[in-house]
Each structure stands twice: as C-alpha cells, then as structure tokens.
Image (cartoon, helix red, strand yellow):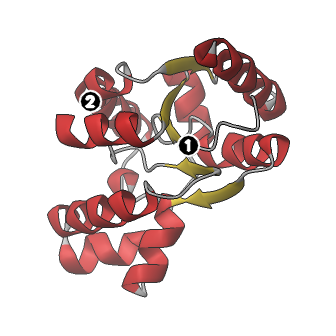
Amino acid sequence: MSNSKTKPIFLCGMMGSGKTTVGKILADKLSFSFTDLDDIIESGAGMSISEIFKLKGEPEFRKLEKKLLFNAAGKSKMVIALGGGALQNQKIVDHLKLKGVLIFLDAPLSVLFSRVKNDSTRPILQNKNESETIDRIQQLLKERLQYYRQSHITVNAGLDDPGLVADSVIKKLSMHES
C-alpha cells in the first residue's frame, strides 16, 4: 500500500471473523494505528459491552456505536475493527465507504462458531447452547451479509494464520488502489 494512502481501513465481518486479531497485524504491517470500535464504546460508556446491553439494551448500544463510529471514521492512517453489527443500515455503509476502505473478513459458519463458542463476553450469544448459538450466528449472518458484501474488498478470513489474512488484505488493497 503506498504511503500516500492514509484513509482509514474498516474491517467488518461476523463475530469471530478475526477483525481485532487481523486488524492489529494489518496496522503494524502498514504502520497505521489500530483501534477496536468495541474498546472505544466501552471507554466512552464507562462500562463493558455486556453491561451496556444489560442496562440500556441493544437499541441504545447501537445508537452509541453509530455515533462513536462516525467520530472514528474521520481519522487517517488507522485500522478500525468494527463490531459484527456495526453496519446497521445503508447510511452507515455508504458513510464508511466514502471515508475509507471497507473490508469484509469472510469466514465460514463452522470457523465462526469454533472461535466464539466459549466466549462468554458476547451478549448476543449469552445463555445459549451449541445449537442455539449456531442458529443465532446463522440468523445474524443472514441479516448482515447484505451490508458486508458491499465492502470494497472481501478477504477469506477462514485461514488459520491471521498474518496470512493480513497479507491477503494488503495484496488486495494494492490492487484496489491501482
């Protein structure tokens, strides 16, 4: 990626697709800074994502998420890992595509499930057995795919090595810029 390119890079995809892990590696390789939208939200709210969901509900969480995302979208030379549901509507997708490069980390359902099945910090999956968790991931993917697929770039994030995923992003970024 050429040094003249300073637009932010937004990583979108389902929970478990590797946005944070790949994002940190990608930022390091590009000499960009890295931030995770969930960290910005927790810092801004003074509580965890789970607490926000529990105390204020998902609609209030989504409002806060959108506000903080739009603020972060103005940054340059930054990789931003979005929450799985951050692309809530067409306005958000269009805004991010205008401000930076939107990249979809696409991973198969089996990979997503294996990565999140033991993660108790995800409020959308709490108190669900294996079958319910798979069903919920499938349902969310079905709802969100229409937004994810509008990304400038799609990368297979089902690979075992997040460094290889980051390399694939860089390769596709260089082709995207030409």
Q: Is residue 77 left or right of residue 110?
A: right
Q: Is residue 135 left or right of residue 174?
A: left
Residue 15 can be seen, yes or no = yes
Relative image position of residue 174 (x, y in whole percent)? 70, 19
| Image: 35 above or below 20 | below
Q: Are marks 1 and 2 in contact (CB under 8 Å)?
A: no
Location of residue 69 (image quadrant): bottom left
Q: Quadrant of the C terminus?
A: top right
Most extreme residue toward the bottom, as rendered?
A: 46
Relative image position of residue 118 (x, y in whole percent)? 58, 50
Q: How crowded is mark 2: few (under 14 residues within 10 Å), some or many (20 or more)?
A: few
Residue at image point 20% right, 64% down: 63
- Determine which residue is flagged by label 1: 7
- Determine which residue is flagged by label 2: 139
* Residue placed most toward the observer, 97 or 141: 97
Residue at image point 45% right, 61% down: 72
| Image: 136 above or below 141 | below
Q: Which amino acid does label 2 sit on?
A: Gln
